[in-house]
Image (tube, rainbow, N blue to C red):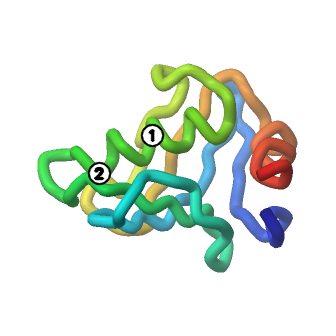
Amino acid sequence: MKDVEKIDILSTPDGAVVVVKAVPGASRDRVVGVLGDAVKVAVSAPAEKGRANDAIARALAEALGVPRRSVTLVHGQTNPRKQFLVAGVDDQYIRNCLEAR
């Protein structure tokens, strides 16, 4: 994946917070690429009752090689621009995983 260096990632004591641009209602779940300063994630789940947020967390966990329980929505419950905490990793780990895709 290109432009990984443009992604807004904040390292915290608990892990790293990554900015995500959500695209619900897609044909399949996947990390699409970089859009501005965010990771663009498309999911087939609809944007209702948190279904898309859960699907995004699963897609991120799979892309980053971490357990689903390590990925938590911290901001943007109803907004297409979201922030997810990936526990136990740093910003460089996330960049390396996404760059390898």
- Identity of the residue drawn at 60% across and 34% down: 86
Residue type beneath disc 1: Ala
Q: Residue lying furthest front in this view?
A: 27
Q: Position of residue 97 (x, y in %)?
A: 79, 43
> How many residues crowd mark 2 within 10 Å: few (<14), some (14–19), many (20+)?
many
Q: Position of residue 100 (x, y in %)?
A: 84, 49
> Left or right: where does residue 62 sit relative to residue 90?
left
- Identity of the residue drawn at 14% across and 55% down: 48
Q: Which mark is residue 23?
A: none
> Left or right: where does residue 18 sit relative to residue 44?
right
Q: Is residue 42 above or below residue 72?
A: below
**Label 1's element?**
helix
Q: How much space separates mark 1 and mark 2, taking CA atoms?
A: 9 Å
Q: Is residue 88 above or below residue 30?
A: above
Q: Which mark is residue 52?
A: 2
Q: Nearer the viewer, residue 48 or 87?
A: 48
Q: Earlier in the sequence, mark 1 or mark 2?
A: 2
Residue type beneath disc 2: Ala
- Identity of the residue drawn at 61% across and 62% down: 39
Q: Nearer the viewer, residue 9 or 49?
A: 49
> How many residues crowd mark 1 within 10 Å: few (<14), some (14–19), many (20+)?
many
Q: Position of residue 93 (x, y in %)?
A: 82, 37
Q: Is residue 60 above or below residue 1?
A: above
Q: Which mark is residue 57?
A: 1
